[in-house]
Amino acid sequence: MIKVLIADNHPIIRMGVKHVLDSANGFQVVDAVSNTAELFERLEKVTPDVVMLEMDIPEINGIATLRKIKKEYPDIKVLMYSGQSEDVYALSTIRAGAFGYLSKASDIDYIISAVKKVSEGNMFITNELAQRLAFDEGTQKPRRFFRKLSTREVEVLKLLASGKRNKDVAQGLNLNEKTVSTYKARLMKKLNVDNMVDLLQQAKALELY
């Protein structure tokens, strides 16, 4: 059973998301709160697998709330969502430690898929966002080490950097383990490293953690 805590100041949205998850198999909404004070009060008493956090939650902004959750409750995965498109907030929320980003315009199956994937410790990002993670926000130019990486290679590197094993990466990206090993070897070659420790250090330097 995947335990979810919803944090959104719009009652209709809270009710809607709760209804979607309660109606799906394998989910339990442990609570739905309207602001960050309520959120952290509840986190002292319940331990959800996933917090669905609205970007514009009152009192503390979404990014600051995300960072506070990561610091105080590192085992909880955060799925950010907003009425804004992915272009507006997704990149900054992923870099701040979110496991995924959803637009409120997403359909029901997409929401269920996102929460399930995040609960398993896998990133939920579109291919477009994975590619954008390879670009510097300030210059919009490819980061030096990412110029030769494909979208899939960026996805694999990000999952490896988050501590996932080959098996977990394979399941998260619908690949087989042999293919993941091939991607790892290719990443080491492209990033000019010869072991996993150095590869993960490169990922850390590029803010992929």
Image: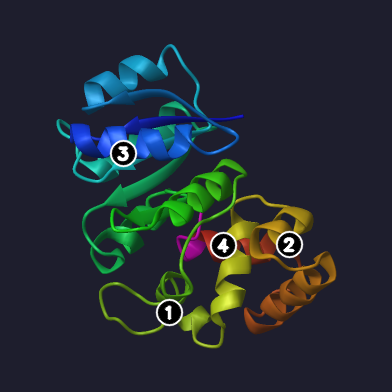
Gap between marks 1 and 3 measured at Cα: 40 Å
For marks 1 and 3, give the one nearer the viewer: 3
Sequence-earlier tag: 2 or 3: 3
- Mark 4 highlights which residue? 158
Vertical position of residue 158 compared to residue 66: above or below: below
Above-or-below relation of 74 to 208: above
Q: Quadrant of the N terminus?
A: top right
Q: Bin the neighbour count of mark 4 within 10 Å (Cα to Cα): few under 14, some 14-19, many 20 and up.
A: many
| Mark before the other along the chain sequence, 2 or 4 | 4
Q: Earlier in the sequence, mark 2 or mark 1?
A: 1
* Residue at which label 3 appears: 16
The mark lying in front, picked from 2 and 4, is 2
Q: Amino acid at mark 2?
A: Ala
Q: CA distance from mark 2 to mark 3?
A: 32 Å
Nearer the viewer's eye, disc 3 or disc 4?
Answer: 3
Residue under the image location 69 percent in, 59 percent down: 169
Residue occupying image coordinates x 76% and y 69%: 180
Q: Mark 2 to mark 1: distance in Å?
A: 26 Å
- Residue drawn at the location 67% of the way across and 64% of the way down: 198
Q: In the figure, residue 18 lies in which quadrant?
A: top left
Image coordinates of residue 4 in percent, x first then y, are 46, 31
Range shown magenta: 205-209
Characterize the magenta stretch by its predominant secondary structure: loop
Q: Residue furthest bottom?
A: 148
Q: Which residue is mark 1?
A: 143
Rendering coords of residue 80 (x, y %): 35, 47
Vertical relation: 162 (above or below) 19: below
- How many numbered badges does the structure rendering display? 4
Q: Is residue 204 part of the magenta span, yes or no?
A: no
- Residue matched to label 2: 170
Residue count near mark 2 (Cα–Cα under 10 Å), binned few <14, some 14–19, many ≥20: some
Badge 1 or badge 3: first in the primary sequence = 3
